[in-house]
Image: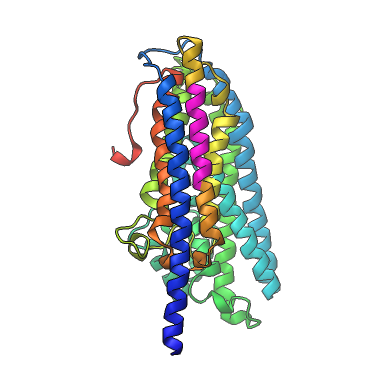
Amino acid sequence: STYLLSLRRNSDRTAGLKFQAERTMAAVRFVRSAWHVALAAAAVLWAAGPAAAFDHADVARRSLEEHIIPSYQDFASRTQSLADATRSFCDARSEAGLAKARSVFKGAVIAWGRIGHIRFGPAVTDNRYDRILFWPDPRHVTMKQVGRLLRTKPEAALKPENVATASVATVGLRALEIVFFGPGSDDFASADKDKTHYRCGLALALSEDLHHTAAVIFEDWTSSDRFQQLWLHPGADNSRYLKPSETTQALVQSFADRLNRMLAYDIPSADGEASNGNGKMPIFGTSGVAIDFLSASLDGLEALLKEGGFLDQSASGSAEDTEDVQQRLNVVLTELRFARRALGLIAQSEARGDFKTIPVAMWKSVRLPVENAREIADETLKAEAGLSSGFNALDGD
């Protein structure tokens, strides 16, 4: 009878989650339909060619000063706090100290979510992006290699010079997630320092390396004699950007690429009605910050459009063209907010800690508005800025 009661409770909970998700999906479809009807009535055909009214230099400057630099400064600051919290915990093991370090780790993950879409320039130099976040990882290389380090405990792997040249799969946020939250972390705060000596040493080495990577990226963006010079001054003598439109192209491509990667790798998809993606856990599911990371990623994309000045630019052609562009970009923002709202429902559900029990409809209510935002934003931003159609970074070289 106890077993049957448990089955009934699980069934009731799943049915409740499905109802909640289906209600959200219905609301999303209704609003999307209303927006599409309004846009269809106002839509115009855009001719290909340069957008003389679009100020590429202004978008480059505002994106740098109001979005890229502040976001990377925040990430660098949070990784410094993570290294400090890890050192404090390792100096005096306690449950409170571990809770603090884990909390600071989650803050660093969220900060990365807000700026991880800027996947060019200093972020990709010397494999820095992958050193921060090695993902996707379909073969679970990080789990295997970090697990091996924790089992075999090679002291050489803790030396800063060795961490700096280590495989990207063994460093960064996901490696730290395994150290702080993975197998064996339950007794991380044990008073027996011999028992947790290596785990603490690895956590400290990884957190300090992560901060170094974040700090170097931030410095490259802020120093006038480094990447900032290339970004703000396109021209014939510029080794990276020949025309002002190329910096806008980099931002537009980054926006689309982040949405593509979220759909391909971050947000679970499903082929059945009972679980997501064959039970696969979303990124940062081990640490319980998966929903926050995905929400932060959507926040970052919205911030790029606002802080980068895309909402304030004029499109080529008539005032009608500009008005239509602004309407479409507002639809993109609405879709991103619908996706965040759907993530919020997952966060509020009892299934948050066990992603295998989340009904497929709940993930669909996240994926649907993200897919729609991607489709509308791609052509709208290119039309606004007079850009030609680019490539999908997920298609390969």
- Can residue 272 be seen in the rendering of this structure? yes
Residue located at (44% from left, 22% from top): 246
* Residue 261 in the image: above or below residue 136: above
In the rendered view, does 391 fall on the left or right side of 331? left
Check the image and tell me how it is coloured: rainbow
Q: Quadrant of the C terminus?
A: top left
- Helix, strand or loop: magenta stretch: helix
Name the residue nearer the viewer: 309 or 277.
277
Instruction: Based on the picture, tell me whether residue 10 belongs to the magenta stretch.
Output: no
Which residues make up the magenta segment?
A: 325-339
Residue 213 x/y as whole percent = 55, 48
- Count the marks: 0
In the rendered view, does 366 fall on the left or right side of 67? left
Residue 364 x/y as whole percent = 40, 52
- Can residue 240 be seen in the rendering of this structure? no
Residue located at (58% from left, 21% from top): 312
Name the residue nearer the viewer: 177 or 214.
177
